Amino acid sequence: MEQEKRKQVGAVDFFCIGFGAIVGVGWAVSINNWMASSGGPLPAAVGYLLALVMMVPVSLCYCELCTMMPVSGGGMAYAFRAFGDKAAYLSGWAALGAFITIIP
């Protein structure tokens, strides 16, 4: 069954965008402390480069999945397509748990 798409942005949508913007700049606020506790700019730069290298394969997989399945839902939608209902359910709850533990 095809759902009709909304063509407006509601109050909850604006709240989520604003909250995401506030939480999303946390790295910019904390970067000075990270640099000071990592041993200086060189070890911090090496850490950032290693993280970048590790994230490239993940981002390439998501790029392929986005073109193959242009639906909303992220990892849960992909898990549903690949493994079915139970894996998608667990994927969604795992993502929620990760967001709740990471954001604070």
Image (cartoon, rainbow, N blue to C red):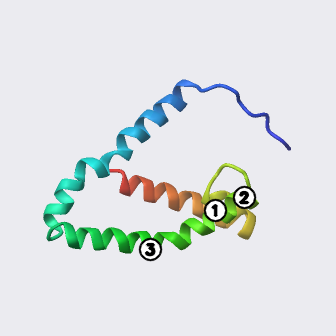
Give the residue drawn at x 55%, y 65%: 59
**Disc 1 + disc 2, Cβ < 8 Å:** yes
Please name the residue that numbered disc 1 is placed on: 63
Please give left or right for residue 92 compared with residue 26 in the image: right
**Based on the displayed image, in which of its 4 quarters is residue 41 positioned?**
bottom left
Q: Is residue 16 above or below residue 55?
A: above
Give the residue drawn at x 60%, y 27%: 9
Q: Is residue 97 above or below residue 26?
A: below
Q: Check disc 2 and report its element: helix, strand or loop.
A: helix
Please give left or right for residue 53 compared with residue 49 in the image: right
Q: In which quadrant will I find the N terminus?
A: top right
Q: Check disc 3 and report its element: helix, strand or loop.
A: helix
Please give left or right for residue 95 compared with residue 67 in the image: left
Residue 67 bears which disc, if any? 2
Q: Which one is earlier in the sequence, the residue at label 1 or at label 3? A: 3
Give the residue drawn at x 44%, y 74%: 53
Count of numbered circles on the image: 3
Query: How far is mark 1 from mark 2, CA to CA?
Result: 7 Å
Mark 2 crowd level (few <14, some 14–19, many ≥20, 10 Å Cα):
few
